[in-house]
Amino acid sequence: MNKEQKTQEIESLKKKFESANFFYLTDSSTLTVAQVNQFRRMCFEKGIEMQVVKNTLAKKALQSFGEERGFEPLYSALEGPTAILFTENASTPAKLIEEFRKSNEKPVLKAAYIDTAVYSGDDQIKVLVSLKSKEDLIGDVIMLLQSPMKNVIGALKSGGNTIAGLVKALEERGNS
């Protein structure tokens, strides 16, 4: 790879890192070609982009952002074979890795970048699997907000019938 190709690769990675709020750094080095192809297919089906990178190029792309994005803790994970999983949903790659590892020993999670938080090490898979998506969190908030409103509306409806009956009875009394 010549200097121009390296520069193009760094620029390409910079664009991906700039637009990605979530990505995982993994090691799938001991997988066979068939296993890697199977994992790539599973990633594609889940909307995850898998890209094998040279660590030095990925590190240079990450370093170009300075400290504002908080990429520094990821630098130590950029050793040995690395594949980056770019995703729109924070927990999907963790669920995919967990599912794939039911029949394979890898890929191993080196680190994950989730909205400025860095999760380092393979032991973080369980934490990442339990992360809720933005849509799930919004749904939970809506359910919490609706619950008291439903109780108040229910009370007003049941009490409304009693009040209306009481007003009607008082009206009839007053007319007689």
Image (tube, rainbow, N blue to C red):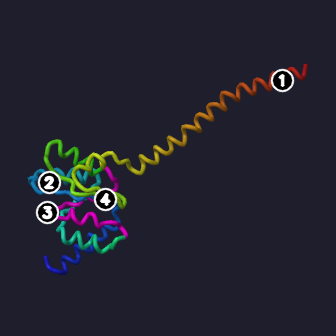
Q: Secondary structure at mark 3?
A: loop
Which residue is pictured at 13% across the width and 46% down the height? 104
Mark 4 to mark 3 CA distance (whole Å): 19 Å
Which residue is pictured at 34% across the width and 53% down the height? 89
Asked if residue 156 is positioned above or below residue 134 in the image, the reply reads above
Mark 3 vs mark 1: in front: 3
Amino acid beneath label 1? Leu
In primary-sequence order, the first of circles 3 and 1 is 3
Task: Name the mark on residue 118.
Answer: 4
* Quarter of the figure with residue 164: top right
* Quarter of the figure with residue 130: top left
Amino acid beneath label 3? Gly
In primary-sequence order, the first of circles 2 and 4 is 2
Task: Provide residue 142's location: percent of width, then percent of height.
Answer: 51, 44
Mark 2 to mark 4 CA distance (whole Å): 25 Å
Amino acid beneath label 2? Val
Q: Which residues are magenta?
A: 68-91
Q: Closest to the observer: 6 or 65?
A: 65
Task: Provide residue 133's location: percent of width, then percent of height.
Answer: 38, 49
Q: Which residue is mark 1?
A: 170
Q: Residues within 10 Å of mark 2 (few under 14, many from 20)?
A: some
